[in-house]
Structures are given as C-alpha cells and as structure tokens.
Amino acid sequence: MARHGKMWVLVVVLALVAAGCGDDAGDGAGGTTTTGGSSSTTGSATRGEATQLTVVAEDFSFSGVPEQLQAGVLDITFENSGQLEHELAFVEIGDTPLDEVGTALAPTIEGGPFPDFLENLAIPLTIPGGETAQTSALLAAGNYALICALTGARPEPGATTTTGGGPDEQGAQGPPHYELGMIQPVTVTGDAAQLSLPQAESTVTARDYAFDVDVSAGRQTVNFTNQGPEQVHHGVFFAFREGVDEAAAESALRTLVTSEDEEAPPPPEIDIEATEQNFGIFSTGLGASYDAEFEAGRTYAVVCFIQDRAGGPPHLIAHDMKEIFTVQ
Ligand SMILES: [Cu+2]
C-alpha cells in the first residue's frame, strides 16, 4: 500500500510490473512461482519453527486464512485464482473495528500519513491473476487485517474490447479490493523477539534511508528485511542496459523521477525486460525471502517509493533512498 505517492510513480511501477510479467511467470513480486498444480489445502500446520499458510485469492475474496497465526516465520503459498492482480497484505489494526479499517487506510494509500494503529505491516507477495507464489515471511504479534489494497476492475463481461485485462490495461480504476470483500481479521500471537528468516545466500537490507545490498551473479535466494528504525520500506529494482555504468544509471534514474511527462517512456538506459525483481513492503524488523537473479557485470538500482509514516513524498524523492550497484 501507499507505494505510489505521485501519479508518475504509479505509471512507472505499473509499466514495469506489466513488462516484467509478460514472458516469465511470477516476476511481479519476485517470489518463487509455479503456475497451476498447487494444492488448495488451506489452514495452517507447523513444520519445525515455520507455520505453513496457503491463501487463495479470488476476485474479490480470500480463503484459507486462519483466525489465529503464530508469530515468527510463515511459509506462505499464495494462489491467485482471480483474473486480477492481488496482494497479500498483513496490516496491524489494533482494536480498530474491521469495517473502519478501509476508511482509515484510504489516505495512506494515496501517499498520506499512516494511521496510528498501523505499527506492523507486511506485504510479502503481489501476483497477477492465475499465478501462485511462495515465500518465507516474518510476522510479528498483533491484531491484523489481511487485505488487498490494490485497485483494478475486472473486464466487463461481454465488453467489445479484447484487452485481456492485464495490469497495464486495468490501470488504477475502481475501489481498493478490500472494499469489495478482500479483508479478513487475523490475530497473531507469540514471541516476536526472535524473528529471523531462514539462512540465505544473499541479503538486501532496507533502513531509514538506504539499502545495504549483498548479492551475487546468478539465481539466488535473497533475504530482504527492513531494519528501520522507524519507517516502512520496500525494494523496487531497475536493471540497466549492458554498458551503462553507475554514474549513467544514477543520471537515468534522476531523469525518470523528475520527468513531468507521465506518458514519456522510461529513459533508454533502463532495461525494462530485465527489470523483474520486487521485494515486498515491510515495517521495521520484518521481511521475506525472494528468489532473484542478477547478471554479472550489469548495473542495477534498488529504490523505495514508500512515504514516511507522517506522509510526504516517496523515500526515493524525499530521502534519495536508493542503492546503485554493479554485480561482480
Ligand atoms: Cu522507504
């Protein structure tokens, strides 16, 4: 939620998600993805220290969401059986009645302040309709609503257009999906003091306001965590074309974010086809594991478009929150 402080950001992110999803399943969220064939078993069971959770999304409902979960590592399978893109967003609501949560969140989604009750936030996965993704994510104790705050309407039945309803065509039309039924209460109990993800080869750490990137060439599991101490972050990746060095990448990124023209294509230095990783949105202490691939010799940027808890411009704009790196 709240990842689009300005319309151009929305346009850019949607364009990148759409481009990334064109030829390779599941790039939208960077999760390990298999299409079809997934068990529809719901509920939870424990294996070791992780809780197994399978959630199925439809247009517009969730199923498989237990009323109670154990704090700690969740091994999540998120199956999107709908036509539209949906997200799995754990939003702490405190004692706010469920029917007042949507109204309280609306300004946040538009780039405004976060409500006071929203301490913990974890949005590990966002995937297009028809896909299934898996991740291990951290969840802290608290009273949550599990919601999808994305917008996007289904194509009208019998409509004469044949646009297919991809994320680019859906645009930002319609109400947030939680207003259409994608909201369920979840109580998370247990000790939140020992939250840590399973070991992974690589790490990307977000903090106020920078990224620490430790990745290598090839396909790998990356643990993405937010170390705060205060703000909410995510990680959106841009890949640059071969031969674009870090100085040129920085200048291209500046061109992208300062462009007044919402219709303008991204700067040519950005390789849309290769821009496929996105790490979810997390409050301090939380995070998830993602399957990611980086090419040796290539330059990338990871940026954050989330606003401060007090509201304001995205962190990339307000705090230059980015890391540009070349993979060895
Ligand atoms: Cu941020």
Image: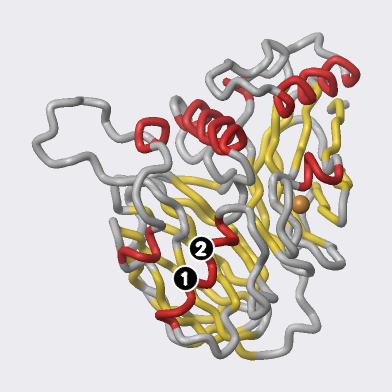
Residue 78 shows in the view: yes
Q: Secondary structure at mark 2?
A: helix
Pointer 1: what residue? Answer: 103
Q: Are marks 1 and 2 in contact (CB under 8 Å)?
A: yes
Tell me the kind of residue under disc 2.
Ala
Pointer 2: what residue? Answer: 106
Q: Find residue 322 and report its image quarter.
A: top right
Q: Residue at x 74, y 83 (%)?
A: 192
Q: Which sits in the foreground, 282 or 310?
A: 310
Q: Which sits in the foreground, 193 or 306?
A: 306
Question: Residue 37 at what x, y percent from top left?
Answer: 33, 51
Question: Residue 69 at what x, y percent from top left?
Answer: 54, 83
From this view, report whether residue 276 is shown above or below residue 1: above
**Which of the image's four quarters has the N terminus?**
bottom right
Tell me the kind of residue under disc 1.
Thr
Residue 223 shows in the view: no
Q: Residue at x 81, y 12 (%)?
A: 244
Q: Find residue 294 and report its image quarter.
A: top right
Does 171 sit left or right of 118 as displayed?
left
Question: Residue 19 at what x, y percent from top left?
Answer: 50, 26
